Image (cartoon, rainbow, N blue to C red):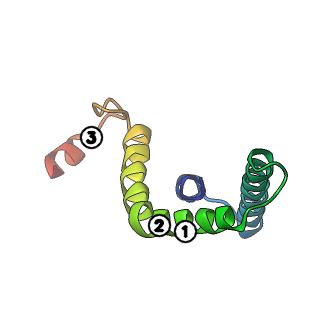
Amino acid sequence: MYDTLLLLRKVIPTGKLFAFLQEFILVAYLGKSAFSFMYTYTAGRIRWYMVFGFFVGISFFHKLVSRYYLKYVEKFFMMFLSGGWFGHGRKRSKKEKSEK
């Protein structure tokens, strides 16, 4: 979810205050969701190995997947914004066509 927020921030630039608020809300939501999940499924006890597992999972995702996710999803967003799968976006001038 954080990587998607970063991509959206590239597409729609925001100020520092709004970026801070976005991240604060995201972290609060994810933290509440994670602890609510753990509390619900462990009979009211927070198991520390589950907390450790969340952090290990986040670390592995960041090291192994995040770079590729950002690269390819950004390409998809840009392709979508530039006119879709087949390039039916804006019409190009003769100069732009000749440069290709």
In the image, residue 68 lies at what x, y percent?
37, 59
Q: Which mark is residue 56?
A: 1
Q: Nearer the viewer, mark 3 or mark 1?
A: 1
Q: Crowdedness of circle 1 by 10 Å Cα count: few (<14), some, many (20+)?
A: few
Q: What is the spatial separation of the Cα atoms under label 1 and label 2, in whole angstroms?
A: 6 Å
Residue at 66 percent across and 61 percent down: it is 50
Q: Are marks 3 and 1 in contact (CB under 8 Å)?
A: no
Question: x%, y% of residue 85?
Answer: 31, 32
Label drawn at residue 84 = none
- Left or right: 25 as drawn, with respect to 90: right
Between disc 3 and disc 2, the foreground one is 2
| 1 sits left or right of 63 in the view | right
Q: Are marks 1 and 2 in contact (CB under 8 Å)?
A: yes
| Alpha carbon distance from label 3 to label 2 | 46 Å
Q: CA distance from mark 3 to mark 1?
A: 51 Å
Q: Amino acid at mark 1?
A: Val
Name the secondary structure under disc 2. Answer: helix
Residue flagged by tag 3: what amino acid is it? Ser
Q: Secondary structure at mark 1?
A: helix
Is residue 28 or residue 74 the one in the foreground? 28
Tag 2: amino acid: Phe
Residue bearing mark 2: 60
Q: Is residue 67 above or below residue 5?
A: below
Instruction: Report the residue at 41% width, 60% height from top.
Output: 65
Residue under label 3, please give it: 93
Residue extending farthest to the right is 44
Q: Mark 2 or mark 3, which is nearer the start of the sequence?
A: 2
Q: Nearer the viewer, residue 80 or 60?
A: 60
Q: Is residue 25 left or right of 55 when viewed as pictured?
A: right
Mark 3 residue element: loop
Point 79% across, 50% down: residue = 36
